[in-house]
Structure formats: structure tokens, C-alpha cells
Image (cartoon, grey):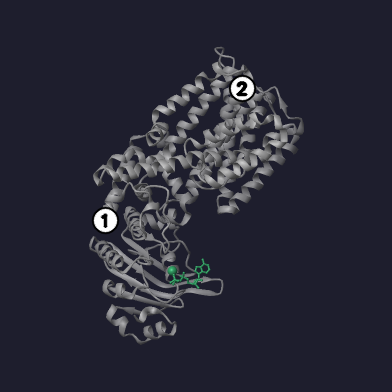
Amino acid sequence: MLKVENLTKMFGGLAAVHDVSVEFEARGINAIIGPNGAGKSTFFNLISGVHKPTSGRILIDGQDVSRMRCDQVARLGVGRTFQTTHLFEQATVLDNLIVGHRLRTRSGLWDVLVNSRRLQREERECRDKARAALDFVGLAHLENRVVLDISQEERKRVAFALALATEPKLVLLDEPAAGVNPEETEGLARLIRKMAEHGLTVCLIEHKMDMIMGLADKIMVLNYGEKIAEGTPAEIKADPTVIEAYLGSDHDAAA
Amino acid sequence: MHRLASLLSGRGSRLFLLACALVFPLLAKSEYQVYVMASAFIWAIAVYGLNIITGYCGQLNLAHGGFFAIGAYALAILTADHGWNFWPAFVAAALVAAAVGALVGLVSLRLKEHFFAIFTLCVGFIIYLLIDKWEELTHGAVGIRGIAAPDGLGLVDFSQTVPFYYLALAFLVLAIWFAGRLAASLLGRTFMAIRNGDALAQSLGIDLMRNKLLAFVLSTTYAGVAGALYASMIRFVGPEEANPNHTFDMITYLLVGGFGTLFGPLAGTVGIVWITQSLQFLEDYRMIIFGPLIVVLVIFMPRGVVGTFLGWKLRKDTEAARAKGPRAGAKVAPAKEANTNA
Ligand SMILES: Nc1ncnc2c1ncn2[C@@H]1O[C@H](COP(=O)(O)OP(=O)(O)OP(=O)(O)O)[C@@H](O)[C@H]1O
Ligand SMILES: [Mg+2]
């Protein structure tokens, strides 16, 4: 589904991602872990087209996306959330979500001028899609609430719903459980599993090890931009290089 | 209070506003007041344009006054120097503003945030300098006289203040109508997603350049139409029309009324034009009152008069819906549009 070949990204002299090759299967949950600054977010930014790779290729279902713009990649079916959620706080939850399906619509200026049938239909579709996505993440009851008034965990779910409204086949989640309590983390883990069960390929970055270990089918470990290990949770737990990287960087992963 | 708020943002209040505007010339104390109101309407049209690129799409365009001047000069040159009829010249003026907007947008919209603002500030100055120095085309500091008044096709004489007032009102209504339709549409939502953040918008598959360019061209077209109307009202244009100060005036109108709201441009422009008029006797000292007034407004109402009102109303609506129990939530459907569409 997602195949990365010798991917490298240099920022000036710094190799944020260095010669990473990896393959992720469809419908699986894949985790990317590593200490702070390891290049995890950069890896996501490369896949989603925010950054152009310095070298290497990214293939999604066999199609090379490494030279594509962000919005083109999104249209191909890559949805994502960011490390920090930025929703429009002064608007309602539903209003935030409606634009999520915009990429599957075609109405332009002319449709607005004459209020065309197509525009009306597409607006209905966007609204339905937004409601469906909100329902999927379990927040149907919040559709008319102002984002300012909902909790951190609810915002995370809204951000998921926004990504889902784009009808992705691959979703990239950057630290979805950061800043939420353990109980809510479990809820989010269940939601992520539900996404995979509905046929999505999930890639997530996370620091919370117990969540990852229980959730992921496959884990890739990055350190200083390089892939130092890859495998099932059990394999990763037992891998001496991983243990060393984590202990060496004084990280809480040992927990 | 809440009921009053609903009344204020409903359809009825729009019709009431329109009725007020229609009878205004009959109630005005002097022709001069009608004239001031007509010019306020024209500036409001330009501010509606600024609201599209800056209010909805989030790109602070500091060349807006320049495009107003381009519209004014295009009409002036075509009617006074080339003897065009008013309406073809008027359409051409809008098209010129749109075309120059497309060119400027293609270059400037590659820049982000304050870089875009600074670049457009420079564009505004360049437009001013061109108009001031390019004497063969613009007659430089002398300006252009003999601009055609709007052609009433033998039915009305738009060189008279009151008929012109109604013409300006008609264009204003058209401008608001389109802005309202835009803001409520998927296209408006696309612009607002960009305002909310380039990165997130792009991750939703929104082509930034294409949408920003469209918003920019729409805004310069509004400015061009307003400028052409202005030239045909004053019947004279000079380089002063392109003074970058006009841009800052318009930003102030929008700031006070409320960025990204449908009635903010109108409230801000008409409000400030009249406050300025009533402080006229203070001459330049009026800034002593005016400056602090705006500072206070921006501190206490960062989203402008209309924006603050709508934010407050949205909160009340959702609270009311929650008080009625979860199922009633669905009934508030029209209210959620209030934030962008009232
Ligand atoms: N746009 C950029 N320009 C320059 N350097 C960057 C840029 N983005 C990231 N970096 C650098 O690349 C390295 C990897 O950053 P990245 O954000 O990918 O780390 P991360 O693994 O996501 O870390 P964290 O766990 O803290 O989120 C860091 O040293 C960072 O400073
Ligand atoms: Mg990161």
C-alpha cells in the first residue's frame, strides 16, 4: 500500500530523514516511534507532500507521489492529523468539518453565482459526509457545539473526523494521544482500531508505548533520521538497538 | 436580549436596513448628506472586496486602495480621453482591475503571511507612483476631468445626487448579495479553511494557489467596480485616489465592523464615515478622539462589532439548544451558519 524507498530529507546540513526504506501493508496499523527530533513528523510531511524529498521515492499503491503537491496527495487518498490540532475555534464542530469533503467536489465560482444544482447537491454531500465522519468518531451529539467549548480529547476526535471526511485510504496520525488522559487514550486507541477495521491503512506516531504495543501490527523505529528497527511489537520490545537508543536518549519509553 | 439578537440577524432586519436605505434621501437634511452616504456605499463595496481576500481568505492585502484607483482611472481614461460610453467603460474598468489583480496575485500569493502583506504594501506604492508619474496615460498630478456620469439611458440623470445614490445602493446590494452567497457556499468555506491555516487546508486537498488567486481577483474586481463608481460620482480623479492611506482606512472599517462577517464591512464603513463626518469640525484633531476610540474597540471587540455580536449569539444559540436537551440540538441548524453568514 505504502512503499518508501531510500527516502532522505536534508534541512541544510541536517538529515532529518536519512535513507529510510519501509513498506506498510493495507488495512494495518503501523506505528512510527523514536525519540524527540528523530524525524517522525518529517517522515509524515514527506509522505503527505508538505516537504519534497531530497532523494528517494514514495509509492502509494504503486503510484509515485514524491514530487506531488500536498493537495494532490490528499486527493489521492492520504488524510492526516497534525501534532497540534488547529481547528477554527469560533465555529461549530460541524462547520469545521464540512470543508473536509471539498476535495471530492467540483463547484466553482460560476456555481456560486447561479446557485447551481451541482453546488446544492455537493453542499448536501459535504454536510452528510461531515455528519457521517462525526458519527464515526462518536461525537454526533456535538455537531452544533462551538469548538472553543469542547475538550482536548474531543478536539482530537474532530481532527480525526476532518481527515476521514476527505475519504482517505491512508491516514497519518501525528501523536493522536498527546495531552489526553489514560482513559481517553484507550478510547482513542479503540477508535484507531475501528478505522483499520473499516479498511483504512493507519500510520501513527506516538510516544505512549503501552498504547502502541497493544495497537500496532508493525512498528518502525527512527533515531536521528535513520530506521534502526522494524517489526512486530514483540520483536521491537526485544531489540537491543531499540533499547539502547531509548535508554541512551533518556526517554520514558522504558515504561 | 437573545430574542432581540435573533431578530437583528434575521431576514427581517435585512429588509428593514434596505428600507432605511431606500427612504434615506427623503429624510436627509441636505443633499450633502445623501452625497456622503452614497460615497460611504461606494467605499463599502470596496471593503466587501477586501473582506473576501482578507476577511474570508485570511491574506492581508495592503494594495487594495491601489486597485480602487485602477478602477477609477480606467473609467476616467476610457470615458474622458477616449470618449467611451459609460457602461462599456465601467465593465472594462472592472476587467482591468481583475486582470491586474490576477498578475499581482500570481506573484504575491507565493509569499506567506506578513511577507505577502509587505509585498502588497509595495505594490500599493508602485500603483500610486505609476499614476502620479505616468503623465501620458494618467495626466499626472493634474488629474482627469470630464469623466462620464453613469448613463441613465435617457430615463434617469445619474449626474444628480439622489439618482446616483440609488445606483450606488443597487451596486452595494449586489455586492452584499454575492458576498453572502459566496460565504455560505463551499467556495467560501474553502477560503475560510485557508484563513484557518495553509497546512491544514492543503492536507484537506485544497489547492492553495488556485483558491487564493480566485479570492484575490474577486477582491480586486470589487475594488475596481467601487473605484469606477467613485470616479463617476466625483467626475474627477487625481493621484490622491491611489494614496495608500485609503487602504488603511478600509482596513480600519473592516476591523471595526468585523473581518469575515457579512455585515461587518457595511457597519464599519457607514459607521466610521459618519463618525468622521460629525467630527469634521475638529479638523485634523479628530484623530485625538478617533484613534483611542479604535484602540478601545480593537481591544474589547477584537472580532469587530458584527463579529463580536455573532460570536455571542452563536454561544447563546448552542446554550439554548443544550438546555432543551440533546435532540433539540438538530433544530439549531440555521444558527450554525450565523458565524459566517449573518
Ligand atoms: N522545516 C524544517 N526546517 C528545518 N529543520 C527541520 C524542519 N522540520 C524539522 N526539522 C528538524 O528535523 C529534525 C526532525 O524533526 P521532526 O519534527 O521530524 O522530529 P519528530 O521525530 O517529529 O520529533 P517530536 O517527537 O519532537 O515531534 C529536528 O532536528 C528538527 O529540528
Ligand atoms: Mg513530531
Depth check, front residue: B295 or B108: B295
Q: Residue at x 41, y 80 (%)?
A: A251
Picture quadrant where residue A191 is located: bottom left
Q: Residue at x 46, y 46 (%)?
A: B191
Residue at image mark 2: B33
- At label 2, the amino acid type is Gln
Residue farthest front in this picture: B1
| Residue A202 in picture, x, y percent from top left | 31, 65
Residue farthest top in this picture: B154
Question: Left of A125 or right of it: where is A13?
Answer: right
Depth check, front residue: B221 or A2: B221
How far apart are labels 1 and 2 at the CA level? Answer: 57 Å
Report the quarter where the N terminus of chain A lies.
Answer: bottom left
Q: Residue at x 34, y 80 (%)?
A: A255
Depth check, front residue: B272 or A31: B272
| Residue A82 in picture, x, y percent from top left | 41, 62
Is the residue marked by circle 1 packed among few (<14), some (14-19), or many (20+) residues within 10 Å?
Answer: some
**Residue A138: image tag:** 1
